[in-house]
Image (tube, rainbow, N blue to C red):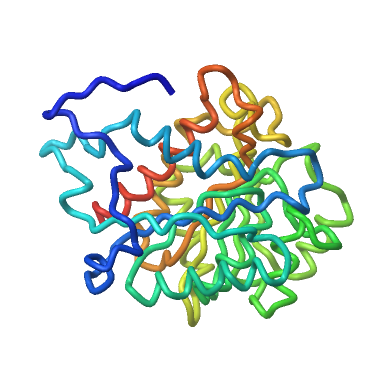
Amino acid sequence: MSALFHDPLWPRAGDWPSAHDPAEASEPVDVALLGVPTWRTSLSATGAHATPAAVREALRRYSPTLIGPPAVDLDAVLAIVDAGDVTEPDGDEGEARVRRAVCDLVTRGALVVALGGDNAATVPVARGAAAGGLVTLDAHLDLRDGRSNGSPVRRLVEDGLDPRRIVQIGIADFANSPAYLARAAKLGITVITLDDARRRPAADLMAEAFSIAGDGAGGVHLDIDVDVCDRAVAPACPASVPGGLSAHELRTLVRAAGSSDALVSADIVEIDATADTDDGRTVRLAALCVLELLAGRATR
């Protein structure tokens, strides 16, 4: 990124203190960023482990300001910290490190926003937050056999997550198989197709999703798989296809989700920052999803 112009009257997002700073350790936390650069079990070649750093850099292109009226400075109304990255988060030992990091942040009162990494990050983040429900924004069901970025929903169910508290939004034609669609139906997962999602106001859709996913003990984890978007706005997502959600549609859904009191954790995944366009449009969209979660949190 080229040097950004400095204006003391135009603050930049992303300049958040370290969660590991002793001065912050005893302070209440509203939101904590955590890099979870999973990539080793991806079904497609990916440089997703480079993405957390890229998203942090992209955040500084934006201001933490909602225009209102009245204007709201997110940094003034939320206590936000950056917990850095979990080293080597893949595999059993790596996932254990992610779970511990997420659990520690949730214990401090934080909404944890995990920067992936591929979709394998969803499993340890949701488990670390002790989420009892799951909402996904994804073109894919992620119910594949095996252990990969295509299996997090199946793995969470096998780990004890009640599938009747899973809502999957944006499931697309030509991106899934009859076998896995049958598996979702048998498990009792609520599937909202891409076409259905487009027909409904974002606030109503998310209210229904969180009423289902939040109906029980434990909060809700939100999985934001950016390949739910149109390939024109998310070219750095290996599995994005033409015809997905627009950037505006995704941002609106994410802000609506961020406003739910049931939300305890979220991940932003499936972006390969090394494959983005020269203008960095996919990574910039991920950074805006971070800010939309903050906006939802601040305006509850």
Going 49% across and 57% down the picture, which residue do you hit? 266
Give 47 or 200, whichever is nearer the viewer: 47
Determine the residue located farthest toward the right in the rendered image: 179
Residue 173 rendering spot, x and y as whole percentages: 76, 38
Image-quadrant location for residue 134: bottom right
| On screen, residue 96 above or below 181 | below
Residue 129 rendering spot, x and y as whole percentages: 49, 72
Give 36 or 62, whichever is nearer the viewer: 36
Q: Is residue 81 visible?
A: yes
Going 52% across and 44% down the picture, which residue do you hit? 52
Q: Quadrant of the C terminus?
A: bottom left
Q: Quadrant of the N terminus?
A: top left
Going 61% across and 48% down the picture, which residue do you hit? 117
Going 17% across and 29% down the picture, which residue do you hit? 10
How many numbered badges does the structure rendering display? 0
Give 86 or 226, whichever is nearer the viewer: 86
Residue 279 rendering spot, x and y as whole percentages: 51, 18
Residue 148 rendering spot, x and y as whole percentages: 78, 56
| On screen, residue 174 above or below 224 | above
